[in-house]
Amino acid sequence: MLTLQWIRSLVFIIQMYVMMLLMGLFFFIPALLSRRAAIFGMRSYCAWVRWTLSWMVGLTTEVRGPVPEGAVLIAAKHQSFLDIILLMGSLPSGRFIMKRELMYAPILGQYALRIGCVPVNRGKRGKAIKKMAEDVRRGATTPGQLIIYPQGTRIAPGVKAPYKVGTFVLYDQLQQPCVPAATNVGVFWPKRGILRKPGHAVMEFLPPLAPGLDQASFMSQIEDVVERNSNALMREAGFDPEASARTPA
């Protein structure tokens, strides 16, 4: 049975990347002419992935909570590529703080820049935070929801990793509400590997933190809210994060 699920997962992954290429090429010219067209193309792809995932792998998806529509900062738990799909597919005008290397990815990098994603060099922490703040300041008039992963990278379920100060830098600079987002997608769609497990993956938008908090209060609250609610979603999926707790390798 596990072998069959692995084969189903492999077929799903192959078609997912084939469709990324085909849909990327199909929407490429409209995307160059219009940011709205680029967003529509990416959201269409996200819908395709969610639909094929449900019947090819048996993994259904859900987005809970009020979907942010205005200019907000979103601080989200990052466990796998699936949470990117759920965020991009549900937000009306989402754009990410992303690692700089993705700029050079064929098709994906061009679309990311077109919708207003902000590339940063994660290898140099101090310079990266300063550059990120400058880039966001220059693009502050770009409409939409700016998404940042406070832990900076994908974190597998049960792994403990610190929350980084860059999230507060943006929150303080933008003076916008910050919407925490929790998830359990890593229980089903791992950080690495082929196997995708059947089940029900959830991304949940939580009540926003108002502008004006100091650094200590903001960092404490955002970590508590995101981790507590992500743990609850993982337990809902049958995974006990406390029993599997470990630090990243």
Image (cartoon, grey):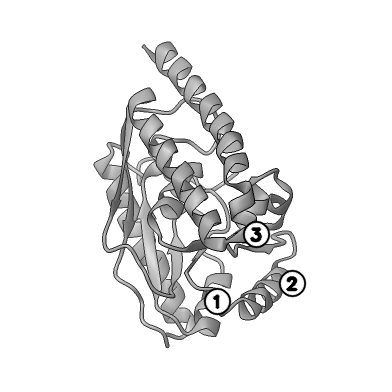
Q: Residues within 10 Å of mark 2 (few under 14, many from 20)?
A: few
The residue that disc 1 covers is 170
Residue 48 at x, y percent in the picture = 43, 37
Name the outermost residue toward the bottom.
212
Residue 34 at x, y percent in the picture = 58, 61
Query: Residue at (44%, 37%) from the top-left corner?
Result: 49
Residue 97 at x, y percent in the picture = 59, 63
Q: Earlier in the sequence, mark 3 or mark 2?
A: 3
Quadrant, the C terminus: top right
- Residue 220 in the image: above or below residue 53: below
The residue that disc 3 covers is 113
Query: Residue at (46%, 23%) from the top-left corner?
Result: 9
**Left or right side of 247 for 206:** left
- The reply to whether residue 99 is in sight is yes
Q: Which of the labelled discs sits on residue 127, or is there none?
A: 2
- The answer to which of 134 and 31 lies nearer the viewer is 31
Instruction: Name which residue type carries label 3.
Output: Leu
What's the distance in space between the residues labelled 3 and 1, CA to CA? 19 Å
Mark 3 vs mark 1: in front: 3
Q: Earlier in the sequence, mark 1 or mark 2?
A: 2
